[in-house]
Every structure is written in C-alpha cells, then in structure tokens.
Amino acid sequence: MLQQSAAALLSPWTGINEAELASRFEYPPDESLGDLSLPCFPLAKQLRRAPNAIAAELAAQVNAAGQPAPSPIRWRAEAAGGFLNLSAVGSEWIDAVLAEAESPQLGRLTDGTGRRVIIDYSSPNIAKPFGVGHLRSTVIGHALANLHRTAGWEVVTVNHLGDWGTQFGKLISAYKRWGNRAALENDPIGESLRLYVRFHDEAEDAPGLIDDGRDWFAKLEQGDEEAHDLWTYFVRESLKEFQRIYARLGVSFDRLLGESFYNDQIKAAVERLQAAGLLEESEGAVVVRLDAEGMPPCLMLKSDGSSIYGSRDLTTALYRREQMNGDKLLYVVGAEQSLHFRQVFAVLEKLDPTWADIELVHVPFGLMKMEGRKMSTRRGKVVFLNEVLEEAVQRASAVIEAKTPDLPDKEDIAEAVGTGAVIFGDLRNRRMLEADFKLEEMVSMEGETGPYLQYTHARARSLLRKAEILGILTNGSPADLKSDEPANALEAADTAAALHPQHASGAPNPHPLDTPAARACLFKLSQYSEAIRGALREHEPSFVARYLLDLAKTYNRFYNSGKILDLAPPQEQSAAGTAPGEAASSAICAAASKLRLSEAVADTLRHGLALLGLKAPDKI
C-alpha cells in the first residue's frame, strides 16, 4: 500500500506507470534515511538529466505538493545523490497500515482470479517408508497450494503416488525369494523396506536379479494375477501409513492419483506422438528426439515395450490440461529431475504448440540430509518422518513443561509446536539449498525457528488478554476499566481526546506509534502482500517465512522498547502537571494504539503461519 501510494504520487512526474514504479522502490539500509527509496539512475536516459538532478527535482515536487486524496498517505522527500528518499508523515499512514492489517481480506490477492492451478506434490513411493526426505516436497507443495489460494487461484492438489514402475517388480521378486507373509502383515512398511534393501545388496553380486525384477514388472503391466494381488496389498498398506503422517502435518489432497491411474491412457498418448511423427527407435527403445532443444532424447517406451517416466508424465500432463482444465501445472519434485521435466515440457510443445499457453512449472528443491549425511532408501539409510515428528513433539513438550507447567491443553500445543518446528525448519531457507536436518535447532524457542514465531504470536495474544481484563479495546477507543480506581479517571476523560492523540487545547501530540521501533514494525507490517507476491512469483515459500521472521523481530523490538500497558495511577499523572482526566485519556490512547499494532501483528503472524502449514496457539 505504501509503495502504491508513493508510486501514484510520482507517476505523473516520471512518466512511468504506477505498477512499474512501485516495483522499483527499495528499502533504505538505514531507517534514518527514510521509509522508501527510489533509485533515479534508470530514469536518467528517459528524462535526459543526471540522476542527482532528477532526485532533487522530484523531492521539491513532493514537498511542494498538497498530496490530496484519494491517498491517505503524505510524504516528505529528500534527495541523496541519485536516490529519492521518502518518509511518511502525519498519522494517516499509520491508521491506513493498521486498517489494512485489520481487514478480513488480510493477505488475500486477486492475481489468480479465474485461473486454475494443478499442484503435484509429496508423491511418495508405495511400499517404502515415508522418510524425512519426503518432507520437502510435502511442505513446499502444501505451502504453495495455500499461497495460490490466498492469491485467488482455484487450486487442485494432487498426490501423484509412485505406485507403478520397475521398483515393484524388484519388490515382488524379493518377496518371492525371501518374503514371509506373517512378517509382511505384522510390519508392512518395515518388511517391504527390508526386502527392497536386500534385493539391491544381493544384486551387486547377482546381476540376474535386476532382470528378474524387470520380468515381474512386465508381468504386472500385463495383468498377471499374483503380481497384481501383491501390488494391491502394498498400495493399501502404504496408504494407511501415509495418511497418518499427512494428518499430523495438516496436509490433505483434492485428488489421490498415482501413476497407475494413467495406465490405460498411456497407449493413446504414445499414439498421438506417433501420429505427429515424433517417435523414433533408438537401441530398441522408443524416444522423442530433442536435439534442436539442446537436450538428449526423451525415452517413452523401454525396449520390452513397457512404459517409463517420460510416457507416464506426458500422459499425466495431457490429463491435467484436457480433463482437469488446468491453466497452470506445478510439479514440486526434487532438483535431480530437472532435465526430465524440461524434456517432457519440450515434448508437449512439439506435440501441440498451444501448450505454450499453459504455465508449466517444475519447482525443484535441494537434497534433505540428516546431520550432514545423505539418505538412501536402497541402502536402508532412511529416517522415518513419523519418528522425527514424535521426537520434535516430545522436545516441545519438555520445553513447555519447564516454562509453563500449568498451561491448559499442553499436549495439543506441544503437537502444534513440534510439528510446526519441523515444517518451518524446512521452509525458512530457499528451497534449492540443501536442507541439513538438525532437530535440536528447529525446536528452539529462540533464533529463526517456527516456535519463535509461535511464541511471538502467543506473546502478543497474552498482552491483548491482559488489556481485555483491564477493559482497553484495541480499536483505538477506551473502554470502561473493570477495576474501580482507573474507572474514575476514565469517566472524567474526554473520549475524543482518547481517540485522537492531542491535548485538550487541540494542539497535536506525536502519535503513540510514531517512534522508531513502532515505525519499523508498521512498515514491515505493510509489506505482507509484497512477500506473498514474491513467494508466488518465485514459487518460493521461504519469502513468507523470512518475512514472518523479520516481522516478529521488529515486533519484539517494539515490545521491548517501552511499556505498552503504561497506565500510571491518576495521582502520579496529576503530580506530573497533567489533569487526571486528561492524563488518563492520553495513557489509554497510547495503550490502545500500541495494542492495535500488537493485534495487527498477531493476526498477520497467524495468517502467515497458516499459509506455511503451521498452527498459531494463543498460549505457549
């Protein structure tokens, strides 16, 4: 809002449209320089003047202008070399920022109105444990789904389960050789993992096992009854385990469509490629050549005629566009699949040029490590996510027990804090960075953690509860205090004086929030929509996570900069030379303004945490 206001003011003088101009503003490195800064260097060529001259001329125009409605924000300008520094003045901008944060439309945008996005995320492999390595796709995808919803998109979330492929042939082969039905039924996931790991260990000395696995997958694709029954069992038991994990993370999906869902559509998709003259044989396999695109061929069918990732993902994309009517297709899949998705997207455009009208986005992310070590299902080096969540909740419970042993609903709050710590620990950094999972750091109430944000939110809510007990409302107006002594002072106070910071004589007082700490918090508050747009533009939930950390830091500095509920007894105020009624009114006004800012921050933290998939308990 502040950038838009400044852009609206400067646009007629620069000849640049408001949206473009708003995107050029920067935040000065030192708050004393101003609230916004416009680099004038890019304007030099267009306006045919030196940047410092442009800045000086714009500053004079801003300071001379009356700056009338519709913008409620007035600006003071100063030229500093080739930069135009702007500072918001008066109290109108403060009320405008708080009103925006108090709106029921907080965090809601209209950028995606009328468009549908299909988001593919999580997508664990059947018959394998839901490990910490699956966390990244799950929480990044869930956050992106929430971000698109708040920006007005119609969102359809899809869990593209890895329930088809050669790995099932390997697992069936392993079960037929070494499996035990009783052991499998007692621990379906654990026993499946043991068999899968043994298969790869044995295959190092017996390469024929790999061929046996391929044969069993070929039988599965051909409808072999025994293979199909085993596959059905693995799928059913895996889904039970996955749902338990998703419930803890607060994640759900609109559609549960595994790779097998598309089996009967793959043939038609391949035939479309054939009809378009795109298929070629290469060493017995069937491929689409992408030489002109600077990529290796995209494999569509293996030499035995069975499907592979290329044909399956091509078929999936066709379905999501033609049957699910997606305008944007998002794939939250690890960075190691970047080439694969570039190939599939290129094949789609070769098949039908109108695919250029569909936004196809691969959202890659870096590896997840555990204490610096890479995890591998094939080697059995996997950490079960449910065990990690349980440990995180226990650690959170221990912290709560030590700090607030009488806290109601301790178990639910520990669950929210523990799982939130794990989620935020992933989302706080840019997704392409490798994530090194360190649970002890994640669960800390200090530092850049989820619990720190949840604690800051709870801190603000606690303050508001105290204000409610005192009878102070947060909308800027005083209320009758419940205790007898302050009530007498309030009854004598002028309500209008409490609503607007001024002396009884009418001379203006500084606004209670026009202090360095409060201004920093207000300006950070005003940047929430900008953080959401940045996260959507880059498909980067960490933009919102970093914003929330900055907001919490500025609020805590404001919180510690002076008492918020500073309601001195009337006799002390009178001794200071102020009439009791006037002093009480001034104190209530200042407290109400500070409480209003506290509530706006708390609401924004709660909304932002929800976008990332975290709960925001009112008490911790």
Image (tube, helix red, strand yellow):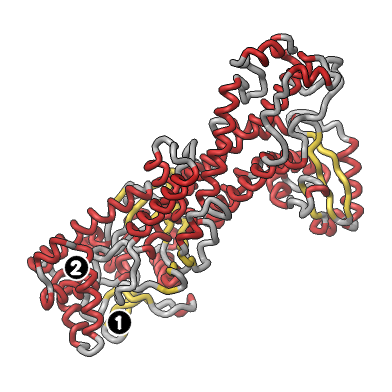
Judging by the rendered image, the residue that carries numbered circle 2 is 191
Label 1 is placed on what type of residue?
A: Glu
Q: Residue 583: which disc?
A: none
Left or right of 125, for residue 58: right
Give the residue at x 77% y 52%.
28
Judging by the rendered image, the residue that carries numbered circle 1 is 281
Q: Quadrant of residue 572?
A: top right
Return the residue nearer the eye: 595 or 295.
595
Give the residue at x 63% y 49%.
550
Label 2 is placed on what type of residue?
A: Glu
Relative vertical location of residue 537 with respect to residue 597 in this rendering, above or below: below
Residue at the extreme left of the image, as rendered:
225
* Sequence-earlier tag: 2 or 1: 2
For the question of whether residue 318 can be seen, the reply is: no
Give the residue at x 52% y 40%.
607
Where residue 355 appears, x then y in whole percent? 44, 59
Say few, some or many: other residues with alpha carbon within 10 Å of mark 2 (under 14 / 14 to 19 / 20 or more): many
Where residue 167 appears, x then y in whole percent? 24, 72
